[in-house]
Amino acid sequence: MQTKKLNWRNVRRALGTLLLSAVLFTACSKKDNLASTQVPAEDESALVNEASALEKTVAAEAETEGKKLGFSTGDLERGGRRTIVQIALGNANLSSLAAAVVKTGLAGALTDASASLTVFAPTNAAFAQLPAPFNNAANIASISSTEQIDFLRNVLLYHVLGAEVLSNQIASGRSSAATLKPAGTANDNTVYISKTFGLIKLNGSTRVIYPNVNATNGVVHVIDKVLLFPTNTIAGIAIANPNFSTLVAALVKTNLAGVFGGSGDFTVFAPTNAAFAQLSAPFNNADNINAITDQGQIDALANILKYHVTGSRYFSWDLGILQRVSTIASAPNNKVTTILGCNIGYVKGDANNKFSKITPADILATNGVIQVIDRVLLPRSNN
């Protein structure tokens, strides 16, 4: 059992490494010696229309999915009729959550009549996306490893806020909230909230599919994925992923690697090795970047990398429609243009003729979020 748990944690660490890679790729600036061979511009109007259409579909789709969970109208009455635990025990679609609450000894806290809590409740289908023994009620009930139980307890506490927050009390746009998980590393007990077109997402990719199930001791918002707290920095994620070796080399060459290995709150639009390969030498691969000695080229690379980094977290659901987002590159040519999507997104530098597609999106790190992109972003020249 212990081995299975460690494997699951390794999966999360691998995601963290990918985030780190993205940060490393963000430090190149100026267009000197950065000629690329890009295909003709993608139809911007088509991307805008695609993003705008989500306003009419995403919230309705989540609502349709939520209605399949079988909650009664009584569960929507203010004040509720049952405790949070009774709600979980009383709905067959939440049996994995109920088993986890019992296994980790949290039933008492979530039954406390004097409490006023918010619980983001993963469905059975959400738990089924995890590896054994965390993937269903029977396996969870059979866990005997103290380490696995402790880990599962922290995962559950990462789904609980210490105050009742209804969906209409969550502001549109970006926000965050501290959970009841004990703090380990920086930001590993914070959940990040994105609210656009009426749809609430957590940590980028988890949807609230049934909000405001009222309990006598708080409120339950049902979600479609289990929230996993981050365990690695952006730098750590990038270094561990071979697809970001060029980005890592660029970060090291420009002395920016340390920035993304510590505390912070960044978004890194992280180009893959294939994205760098579209540039002219010496910026097209790790070996050539490692061999750079010209300080002007190093400075240009550093500014380009910074043009891939923002000073706060933007998940794909936060990117707006042709939103202008400031990066940490030198002003005035320090903004990129973004377009939102569901678990994807698009971003374009001012000197690019095509939007980069973000996929995978929303890789969570302790010090930010990584958005993986398929071409290097280029700022407009100051000349």
Image (cartoon, grey):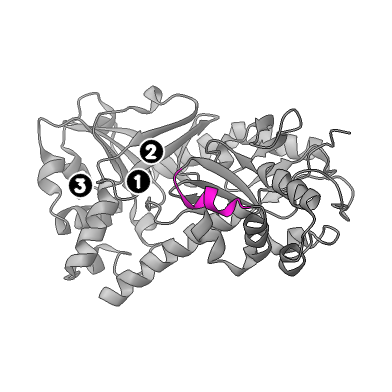
Q: Which residue is mark 3?
A: 90
Residue 89 against residue 209 in the figure, above or below: below
The mark that comes first in sequence, 2 or 3, is 3
Residue 322 has which mark? none
Mark 2 vs 3: CB contact within 8 A:
no
Q: Which residue is mark 2?
A: 210
Regarding residue 132, the answer to whether it shows in the image is no
Residue 64 picture location, percent across and down: 46, 41
Instruction: Choose between 362 and 63: the one closer to the eye.
Output: 362
The mark that comes first in sequence, 3 or 1, is 1
Alpha carbon distance from label 2 to label 3: 16 Å
Q: In the structure shown, which secondary structural element does the residue marked by tag 3 occupy? A: loop
Residue 21 against residue 312 in the figure, above or below: below
Residue 21 picture location, percent across and down: 58, 58
The mark that comes first in sequence, 1 or 2, is 1
Q: In the structure shown, which secondary structural element does the residue marked by tag 1 occupy? A: loop
Read off the magenta span. 255-263
Q: Amino acid at mark 1?
A: Leu
Instruction: Choose between 343 and 253: the one closer to the eye.
Output: 253
Mark 1 vs 2: CB contact within 8 A:
yes
Q: Quadrant of the N terminus?
A: bottom left
Q: Relative to residue 124, is residue 249 drawn left or right?
A: right
Q: In the structure shown, which secondary structural element does the residue marked by tag 2 occupy? A: strand
